[in-house]
């Protein structure tokens, strides 16, 4: 009995059981031991309550009641989407998903029975449906409310493929390989001509884009220059702001650190990127041209103080910046004006300074110069390069044996 319930994904089986395995209609509640007739659905109604068909379980915990109510609401939404389904299936977009349990098989059987009853009531035979599908051109795929019910979300499809739980059915493997090779060639050509880094292919967003094109089907019109530049960009900005809303909520709970990262552009402009760090991660806020602020510590203090004022001092824990003399003075002035926050020097910048000081030691300078000369000589002479590496490998092997 326990193993049978363990294979089922319906959360109702966690809080109910079958006293008699052969009688699946009689389900017993774990909390009050009441036996309900009508399967697991009636048992969930008993535990959730407020249903005319069954009495409410008074011993059921609130978190169990909420879990079952949410699951039943999702099932009801799926049923409403199913009622809008057309009379034929979209055979071209069939997918196979592994690890299907018994409850899902029962639901599929119920759907098939409903489709048979609907077709018999309308007086339409399966052969008539097949003849109708054959008359439709292959280049056009009918789309309707069924698509939103059958197709999984892009993120879910990519995640399942990473786990190896989803594979697309292939009618002709050889033809599919040729088509895929041609499509990949065009995608690669786009990467090469546009100078797109190869690491982009590892992003989930790249895989989501490919999956979205696949689900759309043939005859998809690509986005235009104007669409990429205006409407799509605005939607993506709104999407990014939604993702960052959780970060801003954590700001109030845990506080945050302001980080400034300065760098110099090709035109010798001094730019500073301001970021905010909290337990949810690091968020980029804005970039400022600070060419006129980096000359003195007072000007740098004005820049940092203005940013703290804009983003809000109440939840700021510390301000992290470089260790230049202007930043040191700016940090002291900032702590004096705002005693509730701290100025913290950047650890990475400190390590850079330490390594620079170590590199000024005479013995280290002499060793580095010899290493640079040896490396340049080896790389500039091909034969020596090969023999040198072979000699180094033999030397390393000999040292390994001596150890």
Image (cartoon, helix red, strand yellow):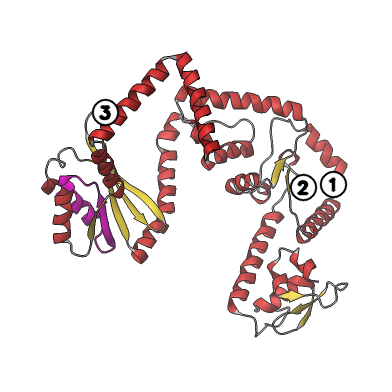
Q: Is residue 151 above or below residue 8?
A: above
The label shown at residue 266 is 3
Q: Secondary structure at mark 3?
A: loop
Tell us which disc is closer to us: 1 or 3. Answer: 3
Tell us which disc is closer to us: 2 or 3. Answer: 3
The label shown at residue 148 is none
Q: Are marks 1 and 3 in contact (CB under 8 Å)?
A: no
Q: For the residue carrying disc 3, how many other residues have a C-alpha within 10 Å: few (<14), some (14-19), or many (20+)?
A: few
> Taking the image as drawn, is residue 51 in sight?
no
The label shown at residue 124 is 1
Most foreground residue, 382 or 1:
382
Q: Are marks 2 and 1 in contact (CB under 8 Å)?
A: yes
The mark nearer the N terminus, 2 or 1, is 2
The mark nearer the N terminus, 2 or 3, is 2
Which residue is at 60% across, 39% downward? 211
- Measured in 3D between alpha carbons, the distance from the residue under mark 1 to the one under mark 3, in whole angstroms, is 72 Å
Q: Secondary structure at mark 1?
A: loop
- Measured in 3D between alpha carbons, the distance from the residue under mark 2 to the one under mark 1, in whole angstroms, is 10 Å
> Taking the image as drawn, is residue 295 in sight?
yes
Q: Is residue 198 magenta?
A: no
Q: Where residue 141 sits in the image (x, y, percent)?
A: 69, 36
Q: What range is drawn magenta here?
A: 302-327
The mark nearer the N terminus, 1 or 3, is 1
The label shown at residue 87 is 2
Q: Are marks 2 and 3 in contact (CB under 8 Å)?
A: no
Which residue is at 63% across, 23% downward? 182
């Amino acid at each position: 009995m326990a193993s049978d319930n363990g294979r089922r994904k319906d959360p109702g089986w966690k809080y109910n059981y079958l006293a008699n395995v052969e009688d699946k209609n009689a389900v017993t509640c774990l909390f009050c031991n009441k036996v309900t007739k009508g399967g697991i659905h009636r048992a969930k109604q008993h535990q959730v309550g407020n249903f005319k068909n069954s009495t409410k379980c008074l011993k059921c915990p609130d978190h169990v009641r909420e879990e079952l109510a949410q699951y039943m609401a999702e099932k009801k939404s799926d049923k409403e989407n199913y009622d809008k389904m057309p009379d034929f299936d979209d055979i071209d977009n069939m997918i196979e998903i592994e690890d299907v349990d018994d409850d899902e098989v029962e639901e599929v059987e119920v759907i098939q029975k409903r489709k048979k009853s609907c077709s018999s009531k309308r007086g339409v035979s399966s052969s008539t449906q097949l003849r109708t599908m054959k008359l439709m051109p292959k280049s056009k795929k009918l789309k309707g409310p069924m698509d939103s019910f059958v197709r999984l979300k892009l993120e879910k499809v990519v995640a399942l493929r990473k786990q190896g739980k989803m594979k697309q059915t292939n009618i002709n493997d050889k033809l599919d390989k040729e088509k895929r090779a041609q499509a990949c060639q065009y995608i690669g050509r786009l990467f090469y001509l546009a100078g797109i880094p190869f690491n982009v292919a590892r992003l989930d967003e790249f895989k989501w884009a490919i999956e979205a094109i696949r689900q759309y089907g043939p005859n998809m019109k690509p986005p235009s220059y104007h669409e990429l530049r205006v409407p799509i960009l605005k939607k993506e900005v709104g999407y990014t702001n939604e993702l960052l809303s959780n970060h801003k909520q954590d700001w109030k709970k845990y506080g945050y650190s302001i980080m400034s990262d300065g760098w110099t552009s090709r035109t010798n402009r001094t730019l500073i990127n301001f970021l905010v760090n909290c337990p949810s991660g690091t968020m980029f806020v804005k970039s400022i041209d600070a060419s006129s602020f980096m000359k003195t510590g007072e000007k740098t203090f004005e820049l940092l103080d203005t940013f703290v004022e804009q983003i809000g001092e109440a939840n700021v824990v510390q301000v992290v910046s470089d260790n230049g003399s202007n930043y040191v003075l700016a940090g002291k002035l900032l702590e004096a004006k705002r005693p509730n926050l701290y100025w913290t020097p950047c650890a990475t910048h400190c390590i850079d300074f330490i390594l620079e000081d170590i590199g000024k030691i005479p013995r280290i300078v002499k060793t580095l110069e010899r290493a640079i000369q040896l490396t340049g000589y080896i790389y500039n002479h091909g034969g020596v390069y090969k023999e040198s590496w072979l000699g180094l490998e033999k030397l390393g092997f000999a040292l390994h044996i001596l150890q």
